[in-house]
Image (spheres, helix red, strand yellow):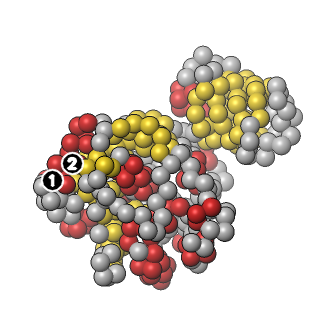
Amino acid sequence: MDIENLNYELPAELIAQKPAEKRDASKLLVLNRADGAIIDSSFANIGDWLRKGDCLVINNTKVLPAKFFTCRSTGAKIEGLFLAQQKDCWLVMLKNSAKIKQGEKLSLLDRDKIPYCPVLAKERLSAGQWLLRPQSDLPAEDVLKNIGFAPLPPYIKRTQPLIEHKTDSLRYQTVYAQYSGAVAAPTAGLHFTEKTIENIKAKGIAIAQVTLHVGEGTFLPVKTKTLQEHKMHSERFSLDSDNAQIINRTIEQGGRVIAVGTTSVRTLETVSVGRKVTPQNGQTDIFITPGFEFRIVDGIITNFHLPKSTLLALVGAFAGLDKIMTSYRHAVEKRYRFYSYGDCMLII
């Protein structure tokens, strides 16, 4: 498939820079994938579109405050993104790091841009990645709690990140986040409140949980001419036996499996064996593109995705690319808010 088939025009002002005032106050576009019908609704009414016996599958990953700043001895400040702990080192992405030398001593900065602790630029890797060795006995997660910011995607601008930090650290996180490890939020879940979940359960709808730690690859656009040439990134996932049982029971009893977010979709289809899921944990690089045969997922709650992205390819595979592009044009016309802090759609 030519990547231009995943392209669309989006006015810059429709890229949401802040979350809705209330989590469930976003718009909801409902797309019927059977006939292409589109209905404009509100996320607060999400329960109206679900049925007793259905199962919502949520991703309980917790976003690390993975964005940080470091400083050279010259005073030059460099933005970084923590990716993973590797023994006594951090695997990170550093912006504009061409002038940094291996073995150079830097300083990690706290949120006030004051030196927090020294850090050694141990090894330059490929594609802007580095191994850094902080001079701290604390685990990376604890250090980041003291110095880090929410790892917002590059299309969300923060000229004064310290001022916005409190809001972003709360709202760029689902209310059901449990297990730390993501460097980007599973954004479809950002619309849910505790009350929304209680109301859904009260209707006789099951909630199952998976864990997929969203990686930095989720932000990468497809740069190849065709979708098939793109190398899909890999992410860590887990599904335990209790939650697998909830999902399989729903399927056996004729209920629908509704995935909250593309991360839940990728996990469910990774662990599928026929029309069942099996408890597993590991790495997945599943690449869902038009023509993919879905075994588990009957519906998707998802945000609006970037042009030429693997996530747009995924929802196009599920609903039909023509229907998705029509619904996106409708969303633009109706002034929906797009991307991570934007509005939402339900595909059933």
Secondary element under disc 2, as helix, strand or loop, is helix
Q: Along the horizontal axis of the image, is 317 left or right of 138?
A: left
Q: Can residue 63 be seen in this view?
A: no
> The disc labelled 2 sits on which kind of residue?
Asn
**Mark 1 neighbour class, 10 Å CA radius: few under 14, some 14 to 19, many 20 or more:** few
> The disc labelled 1 sits on which kind of residue?
Glu
**At 38% from the left edge and 67% from the top edge, which residue is drawn?**
318
Q: What residue did someone put label 2 on?
A: 248
**At 56% from the left edge and 72% from the top edge, which residue is drawn?**
1
Q: Is 120 drawn above or below residue 261 in the view shown? A: above
**At 53% from the left edge and 61% from the top edge, which residue is drawn?**
310
Q: Along the horizontal axis of the image, is 61 left or right of 200?
A: right
Quarter containing the C terminus: bottom left
Residue 154: horizontal and vertical position, in percent? 63, 56
Pointer 2 with pointer 1, Cβ within 8 A: yes
Q: What residue did someone put label 1 on?
A: 252
